Amino acid sequence: MSLREKSNAEISNLLTDYCIKHGPVVRSTRSLYERKLEEAMAKDRTFYREEEEEITDITYYHPKRRKTSAISGRHHNEVEIRRPISWRPGGKMWMVIPAVLLLTALTLSFYTLLL
Amino acid sequence: MSSTSQKHGAFVAAPMGEKRVTALPGIGKILGRRMEKSGFDKANVVLGQFLVLKKDEELFDNWLKDTCGANAKQQRDCYGCLREWCDAFL
């Protein structure tokens, strides 16, 4: 239903909904208020369209631990990290660096124990 | 340099009665003709519109621009004059 088909009361209610300051909707003010409403509605549609275009990146992080046998004498405790397939800018890269550091620290500590 | 014109001074000094729309500051011959075409042939009819728009500056300026194509200065002059006239006589 276009604005032109709406009654003066409906236009007045719409103006209130859109927080547009207004006086009575009469013949001489009608076209002004219709234009203001069209502008406000167009702005609203632009806002919602921009929201729909937002794409949220979800990368799944699955740490997988695999312990080698104690009999072999090699006490490696390897932590396998499955990295996300594609490196997206702004993805969860920040989690990988501390994980690598942790792995290095663990490996070093086990070597120290062996000595 | 005075901020309001002679036209302004003359308009706000007395009740507007049946003065033509061109008596309003900011409304010259060309804008006046456009206003008359839209049915606003007298200053008191413009006053009526001013009051129906609740004396709101933005609404009145928008309406004036839509009706006769007044620029910012013309809008300012007309609004200021009507505002002052209402303060004195309404």
Image (cartoon, rainbow, N blue to C red):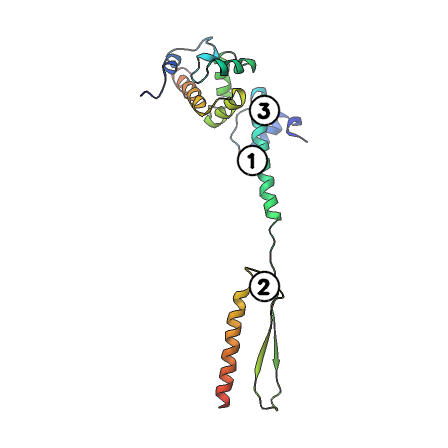
The residue under label 2 is: A87
Rendered-image quadrant of the N terminus of chain B: top left
CA separation in Å, label 2 and label 1: 43 Å
> Relative to B26, is A73 on the left or the right?
right
Residue type at mark 1: give it.
Answer: Tyr
Residue type at mark 3: give it.
Answer: Ser
Residue B87, given in percent of the width and then of the height, sits at 39, 19
- Which type of secondary structure does the marked residue at label 3 adopt? helix
The residue under label 1 is: A18
Up-down relation of residue B10 to residue B57 (above or below): above
- Depth order, front residue of B11/A7: B11
- Which type of secondary structure does the marked residue at label 2 adopt? loop
The residue at the point 58 percent across, 24 percent down is: A31
Tag 1 and tag 3, C-beta contact below 8 Å:
no
Residue A15, given in percent of the width and then of the height, sits at 56, 31
Question: Chain under label 3?
Answer: A
Question: Chain under label 1?
Answer: A
Up-down relation of residue B30 to residue A91 (above or below): above
Residue type at mark 2: give it.
Answer: Trp
Rendered-image quadrant of the C terminus of chain B: top left
The residue under label 3 is: A31
Sequence-first disc among 1 and 3: 1
Sequence-first disc among 2 and 3: 3
